[in-house]
Image (cartoon, grey):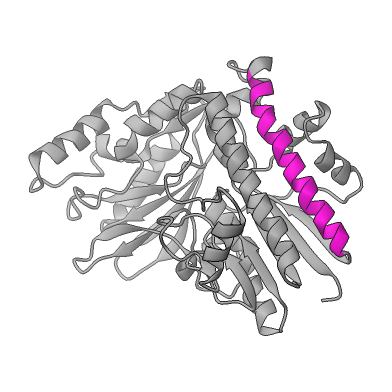
Amino acid sequence: MKNKVLIIGIDGGTWDVLNLLFDNGVMPALSDLVKSSTVGVLKSTEPPITPAAWTSFYTGLPADVHGIRGFRILQKNSKGHFEYKLVNNENIGYKSIWSFLSDRGKKICLINLPLSYPPPAVNGIVVSGFPIPSQQVCYTYPKGLKKEILKKIQGFEILTIGRHSWSGNIERFVDKMVISSRTTALLGKYLLQKDSWDLFMLYFQETDLIQHPLWFCLDPTHESFTKERFNIVSKFYNALDEQINMLLQEARNIGNTRIIFLSDHGFQKCRYCINLNTWLYRNGYLQLRKNVQAELLRIFRKGLNRIPLIKRIKNARTLRSHFKDAFVSNVFFEKVLNYKKSLGFFETNGTNIAYFHTLGNIEANSLVFQKLRDLKGLDNKPAVKNISLLEQHNNYYIYKMELYP
């Protein structure tokens, strides 16, 4: 490797937001870099979601091959039932870019990369990224690096599960994101200076964490957009620009460094969402067990009967309410699903790609799929774009269903 390579990942770094910020002078350093660089729009993975896309970047394989399609994977337990397990580095069954380079004697530094926990043993150093179960676990390689980081970077906290969730207060949330990204950047600067390296990869997740609940502050076409809200959220991006500029300057001081900015997926306004497992339940294709605790069963049935099958998304508050109220139709029913009487269930990740797992009566699939193809959105247009067989196992099939955006 004649040149060193610095890769900075920006989660959900869509040009729709970046160009708006550039035009308003919010991110001058990144804007200047874009003007002097080769840029383009890349097609994301299917599904276009963080764990699938970054795993594809690490391995060079599509999601349908490496099998990481979300933050959770389905595994069978001793009873033959499926259970969700949070995905991590150990679930990536293919060799990654850092493994190839480490094997060839290249020095590696990885900071905050998704699905890099537990930290892989590399020829270099690793600070793992989301999802990490807690601050107490060892998320660095080598192990002693964690103590060193906490001593050197004041206020640094690794992004663990549940940390920095949307609180409902825009200014307070923006301030948290500024602090989180700043400590990540300071860690990056420290490790850039600490040792020699050939490949240095650092990832900012805060952009994704902000855009999910606060998209209405960044999209001028959104009915809830105001200039005041845009200016508040812009404070984060302006701070991020300063942090990026600090890293770029450090890389330039080192010299002989190629710089790559990379994103995993884009962003857009969500018009409406469909609760697919609710649809299966109401059509009799998904049934619940009777021999479970009555209160648990009552909660699930109440949710499946009362949640709107198709719900329009109007603003961030509505979106939060939807995911809170509709959790029973967006997670797997491992505790209450009747395996013998259910045709199947949907595995969803909040994108336009869903996976239908059949549990037995394969012949009935064609009828289900025909009804799904007839399903209309709130605009009275077809909701389902395509259904295709993805995987075939001994006693069940997995179908991939693509919805219209």
The structure residue drawn at horizontal position 78% and vertical position 33%, both measured from the top left corner, is: 19
Asked whether residue 145 is in view, the answer is yes
Q: Which residue lies furthest to the right in this view?
A: 36
Q: Position of residue 118 (x, y in %)?
A: 47, 67
Q: Is residue 273 in the magenta section?
A: no
Q: In this view, does 376 lie above or below 133?
A: above
Main secondary-structure element of the magenta-colored stretch? helix
Observer-nearest residue: 31 or 156?
Answer: 156
> Could you say which quadrant of the image residue 16 lies in?
top right
Q: Residue furthest bottom?
A: 104
Quadrant where the N terminus lies?
A: bottom right
> Could you say which quadrant of the image residue 398 lies in?
bottom left
Task: Report the span colored magenta.
Answer: 229-254
Asked whether residue 265 is in view, the answer is no
Quadrant where the C terminus lies?
A: top right
Q: Is residue 99 above or below residue 168?
A: below
- In the image, 252: left or right of 347? right
The structure residue drawn at horizontal position 77% and vertical position 30%, both measured from the top left corner, is: 26
Q: Is residue 250 in the magenta section?
A: yes
Observer-nearest residue: 37 or 168?
Answer: 168
> Could you say which quadrant of the image residue 23 lies in?
top right
